[in-house]
Image (spheres, helix red, strand yellow):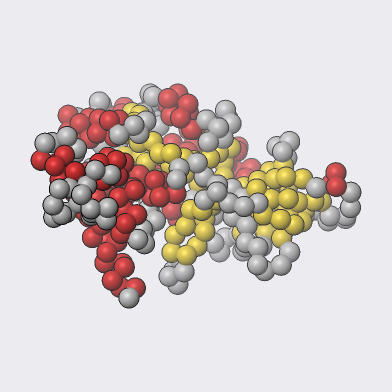
């Protein structure tokens, strides 16, 4: 095999040892991987080459991952759903009634993965966000999360959403019913979605969650993973919860104790800011809830 036969490609769908690749010129090919130790996932950058007299390509190498999107599977083991993401869009809407703690949990997960995040308030065709929702959206804006109001149905605000997603590899997350599938459908075209799934003949394709990467018309990708849309990864180390809350992390530098958890400690800059109403009390409640959840997980492990 000459070196010119070797291609760099992106995994756009993975089903066990088989996968679909998108080559640099945009061609989609089916592929498989040799050996048991390499497990490709959506978003992986791989080296592959065609095989003589075979329709499938062979993957020989998986590039180092910048990050991984994970969730526990039914047996409690961690399953990697996608790799190399760089944006999380936390979607909410007037209905179902927003659970801001869930939004915070997603934002926290994005900070943990070291990727950017945006907040998207969908279904704006039903009217402007009411005063309470608008105030919460302003809190996210004040934390420098791009915060957009849009409607998958009427098209309102979608250009701004497209602008934020462009040239990124994004995961769309949020409570069930907020319109994630509707958004993915209008932001991509239906041919892109069906082409991606039907193009893969891999066995076992119906036995696992279909995580696929769908190209965006202006460049970039959305990862469509039904298994993770309603799920935010758990945090293992209580010390990491702080990193997930930008304002608390920033203020935490000024606390008297380096390991301050900002609850009852003396000379805590976060509690002082809370007293002065210079941070959102609701966000602080989310922080405490995340911290309690994480501490409970930690105790269960020992
Ligand atoms: P998902 O569970 O987050 O994927 O939400 P879906 O995309 O399945 O949408 C849930 C419901 O909300 C469906 O009945 C959609 O038709 C509706 N929906 C989605 N987007 C909009 C929107 O922009 N405006 C309105 N009024 N309804 C929407
Ligand atoms: Zn503190």
**Observer-nearest residue: 44 or 99?**
44
Q: Which residue is found at the position 85% from the left and 47% from the top?
A: 3
Percent x, y for residue 160? 42, 25
Q: Which residue is found at the position 19% from the left and 43% from the top?
A: 269
Residue lying farthest to the bottom in this orientation: 302
Percent x, y for residue 148? 35, 29
Percent x, y for residue 122? 34, 34
Residue 63 position (above or below residue 135): below
Q: Looking at the figure, which quarter contains the C terminus? A: bottom left
Percent x, y for residue 143? 30, 34
Corner quadrant of residue 124: top left
Left or right: 138 with respect to 226?
A: left
Residue 233 position (above or below residue 7): below
Left or right: 167 with respect to 267?
A: right
Left or right: 255 with respect to 49?
A: left
Q: Is residue 20 visible?
A: no
Residue 53 position (above or below residue 92): below
Q: Which residue is found at the position 16% from the left and 39% from the top?
A: 273
Q: Which residue is found at the position 69% from the left and 50% from the top?
A: 46
Corner quadrant of residue 62: bottom right
């Amino acid at each position: 095999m000459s070196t010119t036969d070797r291609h760099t490609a992106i995994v756009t769908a993975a089903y066990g040892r088989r996968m679909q690749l998108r080559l640099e010129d945009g061609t989609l090919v089916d592929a498989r991987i040799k050996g048991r130790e390499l497990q490709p996932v959506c978003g992986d950058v791989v080296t592959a080459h065609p095989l003589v007299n075979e329709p499938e390509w062979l993957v020989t190498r998986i590039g180092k991952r910048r990050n991984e999107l994970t969730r526990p599977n039914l047996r409690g083991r961690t399953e990697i759903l996608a790799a190399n993401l760089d944006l999380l869009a936390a979607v909410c809407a007037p209905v179902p009634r927003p659970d801001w703690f869930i939004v915070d949990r997603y934002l926290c997960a994005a900070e943990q993965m070291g990727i950017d995040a945006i907040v998207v308030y969908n279904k704006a065709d039903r009217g402007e966000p009411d005063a309470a929702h608008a105030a919460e959206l302003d809190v996210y804006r004040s934390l420098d999360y791009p915060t957009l109001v849009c409607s998958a149905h009427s098209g309102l605000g979608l250009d701004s959403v497209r602008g934020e997603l462009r040239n990124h590899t994004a995961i769309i997350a949020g409570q069930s019913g907020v319109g994630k599938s509707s958004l993915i459908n209008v932001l991509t075209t239906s041919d892109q979605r069906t082409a991606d799934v039907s193009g893969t003949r891999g066995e076992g394709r119906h036995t696992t969650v279909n995580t696929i990467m769908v190209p965006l018309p202006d460049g970039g990708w959305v990862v469509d993973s039904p298994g993770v849309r309603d799920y935010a990864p758990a945090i293992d180390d209580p010390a990491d919860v702080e990193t997930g809350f930008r304002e608390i992390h920033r203020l935490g530098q000024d606390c008297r104790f380096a390991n301050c958890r900002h609850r009852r400690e003396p000379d805590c800059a976060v509690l002082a800011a809370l007293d002065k109403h210079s941070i959102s009390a609701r966000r602080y409640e989310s922080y405490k809830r995340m911290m309690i959840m994480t501490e409970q997980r930690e105790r269960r492990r020992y």
